[in-house]
Image (spheres, grey):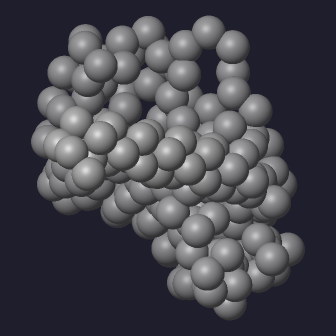
Amino acid sequence: MNAKLLKRAALATAAVLALGTGAAYLYLDATSEVRRTGATACADVIPADADRADGEAVCATIDALTAAWGAGDADAYGRQFTENGTYTTYVGSHYEGRADITEGHRALFQEFVKGTELAASYLDMRFPTKDVAVLTGRGDDYSGDKPGARELSKVQTYTLVRDTDGVWRIAAFHNTKRQNVMERLSFLYAPATAPKAER
């Protein structure tokens, strides 16, 4: 076989592989919808055995955080965190302390997320102790039309504490971007890896 034919065969093989890979990716992406989208209101996930007032106070902190984001108000945003709170973004940036969180968001509100709003749904809330709450949900920032619950691309965990002044504040926040194709692939390859709510 001459070099010209060999080169054409290699290019044709590469094109077929690329098309097959693209089709597989599109299939996995199209079939990776989450089943458990969560509640649209934070108060809907307050546990029945929890102090209702504490649950509502936790939700009020999240509401204040959302309002501060929408207003692009870094100072109000930072006030929702404890003095030594931590904040881990989905790209892996890790902020330590209220001042660091505030200043990081001041820059974000002027650049990358300027003019955006927050959308969220809530999966669960629990109180490991009377002064600690863990709230898990799905979320995203957006501009324009608010995304639906199935479109939220991040999974978020808030750990809140009753601060020294009695106000519930965020002690730690962790934001993970959902890798839907990888998740779907792992569920197909090893179905037992899927969370119960997604089986």
Numbered marks: total = 0
Residue at x 50% of width, y 74% of height:
131
Side of 187 relative to 34 (left or right): left
Residue at x 45% of width, y 65% of height:
159
Q: Is residue 191 above or below residue 120?
A: below
Q: Is residue 104 above or below residue 190?
A: above
Q: Nearer the viewer, residue 71 or 152?
A: 152
Q: Nearer the viewer, residue 166 or 153?
A: 153
Residue 150: percent from the left, percent from the top? 74, 43
Residue 24: percent from the left, percent from the top? 60, 53
Residue 199 appears in view: yes
Q: Residue furthest bottom?
A: 192
Q: Nearer the viewer, residue 33 or 29?
A: 29
Q: Nearer the viewer, residue 99 or 156?
A: 156
Residue at x 37% of width, y 32% of height:
77
Residue at x 36% of width, y 12% of height:
114
Q: Is residue 57 above or below residue 191?
A: above
Side of 109 relative to 51 (left or right): left
Residue 68 appears in which quarter of the rendering?
top left
Q: Residue furthest front?
A: 1
Residue 138 appears in view: no
Residue 28: percent from the left, percent from the top? 65, 55
Residue 148: percent from the left, percent from the top? 76, 33
Quadrant holding the C terminus: bottom right
Side of 84 relative to 146 (left or right): left
